Each structure stands twice: as C-alpha cells, then as structure tokens.
Image (cartoon, rainbow, N blue to C red):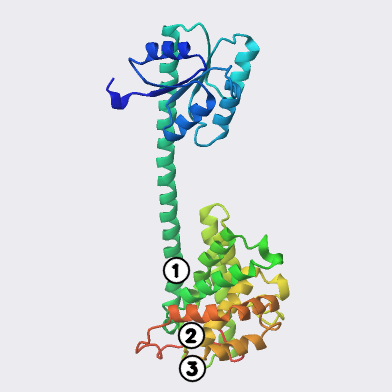
Amino acid sequence: MHQVNRATILAVDDTPTVIDIVKSILSDEYTVQAATKAETAFKIISKRKPDLILLDVMMPDIDGYQMCEQLKASPETQDIPVIFLTAKSQEVNETTGLALGAVDYITKPICPTILKQRIKNHLSLKSARDQLAEQNELLENKVRERTRQLSDLQDVALVAMGALAESRDPETGNHIRRTQNYVRTLATELAKLDKYQSILLPEVITAMAKSAPLHDIGKVGVVDSILLKPGPLTAEEFEEMKRHTEYGYAAICAAEGSLGYADNFLLFAKEIVYCHHEKWDGSGYPRGLSGEDIPLSARIMALADVYDALISQRVYKPAFSHEKAIAIITEGRGHHFDPVLTDVFLANAEKFREIAVAYSDIVTSNQNVIKTEKSQSSVVS
C-alpha cells in the first residue's frame, strides 16, 4: 500500500514491549503511532486524528476506560474506532469497554492474524460509515437546495397570482411588494410582545408574508363595469365589490382542496383574503367581525393595506404624506384597527416609510386612467 494511502493506527500502551510488538505486526500495512500514556495520546490526536486507536486498559495516568469515555464524549474524536488491547480478560472488563463505545475488545497475548483481521474489518466498517455520512450530507444539501428552490418558486407563484389580480388595478404598482414587507415587519415587531411570542413564530411570520400577495386575488371575480368604473360606486355596486373577499376565499379553498392537506400559508391566505376588510369595531365586511374575532393575520394585513392605500396615488385621491397617513391610522386606533397592533405600527412607522421608498412606484402615463375599488365612506386599496 502506498504511503499516502496508509491508514494511521495509534497504539496506546504503557509497556514499550507491547508497542514494539504492535509496530512489528502492523507497520507493513499501516502507519503506526505510539503513546505510553493518555496525555501523550491526546496530544498526538489533536495534531492529526488517527483512523483507529488500539488502547490498553491499565495505564499510569488515566486508564483506558477513562480515555475511551473522553474520546467518545468529544464530537472531534467520537467517530474514531477504539479497540481495547489488554490483558484484562474477564467478561466484565470486555462488557465495560464495549459499553463505553469501543468497537472491539482483544485480549493479550496478541495473536497477529486476529489483530490484523479485526483492524481491517473495523477500518472497512469506518470507511463505509464515512462514505454513507458523506452521501447523506450530499443528499441533505440537495434536499435543502431543492426545498429553497421550491420555496422561491412558491413565492414567485404567489406574487404572480397577486399581480394577476392587481393587473386589473394598474395604479397600485408595487403595492404587493410593499404590503408583503409591511406584513412581515408588523408581525416581527408584534412577536416581541409577550402575548404573541408563542404565536408569531418565525415560520408563522414567513407563512403570513407568503400569503400577503393574495389579499385581493378575488378582484378577478369582479366585473369590469364595477372594478374599472371611473366614478363613485352606487350602493349596489359597492355591495358587489365587497364580494371580492368571498371570491378570493372560495378560490383559496378550492386550491386547498386540490392540494389534499392544509398548509400554513393557505390557512393564512384564506384568513387574509376573507377578513382583511373587517374592522376592530365590527363595521367592516364581509362578516362584520370585531376585536380579536378577526384573525390576527387579517388584522395585520388590514393595517398594512390601508397604510399603502393612503400613501399611494389613486384616481379619487392624491398620495398622502407619510405623516398624514400616520395621523389617519392613529385616528382609526380602536375603531378600524387593532389598538395593540396600531401601537406597534406607530412605534415602527419609520420602517414603513423605508419600505415605501424602497418599493416606490414608477410613475407611468396610464396610472391615472383606471380607477380601482373604492368606497364612499372609507379608503379601500
């Protein structure tokens, strides 16, 4: 065997004669290192891990059992096969050694053929384990990468679906991206409160943010004569406009049914789509829910959606300043919006301004052509 391919065996025995015997038996096939006490052995191991350790039980500083226990307790050395090579031949001694994690137990006097075969077998097993671990790591890396790709694809698909609805509402521009980031920011800050720490876990916040682009997906079900009407809606038309929440909810339910199992982001998508026009005081739609009967995800979306509507230009209104939007939302605390959530929003208002700037709309000539959904009594984005 070429020197560079040789496995390294560390023999630890306080008797130099035993060390010499081991070297004479193994040196033709292996690189043999030696130590007469555990302290020296650990120094050798720290410089270069051997492929296998032959370990005596009776040694002057710490015995072989203690050394084996320390080796198996360290992540750096726990995978090195340890074979006890000792004169202690009672069954209890062998049982103790194997229980500590040794792979084998050989009693002296040394039989060269047995020693060589046992070492060969355990090195082969270690090689197989190492290869399996490497294969598993490669597989896990591939799974993680594929999972990341699927997650990215899911994000793109959700945004595309949301954009499909918003394509009938061209003046909203980057509304989807802004509101998605508002939702993530609000949920992250709300999670710092004791009440919500166990509810708004990182994976929950991620699922909510993934769902946010779908909030107005139901607009695709509203007829053009209402959705694109340039003037104020009649009471009857507004009632039909409000049904976009029901259309969206039905679409998400159908998608969930096709999937065959419930997924967090679909759960939050249903809540957001159906309930983000509900108001804290019960005056919203479609069900007139109030207070904490409104799902948390929808309460978060409601604030994010209205803030963006306020700072964005619409046919029926100019873009309000950040300061005016803050004032309107403050006025809606406890009426339109969850009071606690409003307080969190106000404490982090500058982050919302930064998101709005980062995803600001590019003004185009057709922004002032088509009207979106609007109510005569409240701002609806």
Foreground residue, 222 or 351?
A: 351
Residue holding disc 3: 318
Amino acid at pointer 1? Val
Foreground residue, 352 or 244?
A: 352
Number of the front mark, 1 or 2: 1
Residue holding disc 1: 159
In the figure, is residue 281 to the left or right of 211? right
In this rendering, the answer to whether 164 lies above or below 77 is below
| Position of residue 84 measured from the top left corner of the image (x, y, whole percent) | 53, 17
In percent of the image, x 39 and y 88: which residue is there? 367
Foreground residue, 306 or 131?
A: 131
| Position of residue 22 measured from the top left corner of the image (x, y, whole percent) | 43, 13
| Position of residue 352 measured from the top left corner of the image (x, y, whole percent) | 53, 79
Query: Do residues under tags 3 and 1 come within 8 Å of each other at their CB atoms?
Result: no
Lower position in the chain sequence, tag 1 or tag 2? 1
Badge 1 marks a residue whose secondary structure is helix
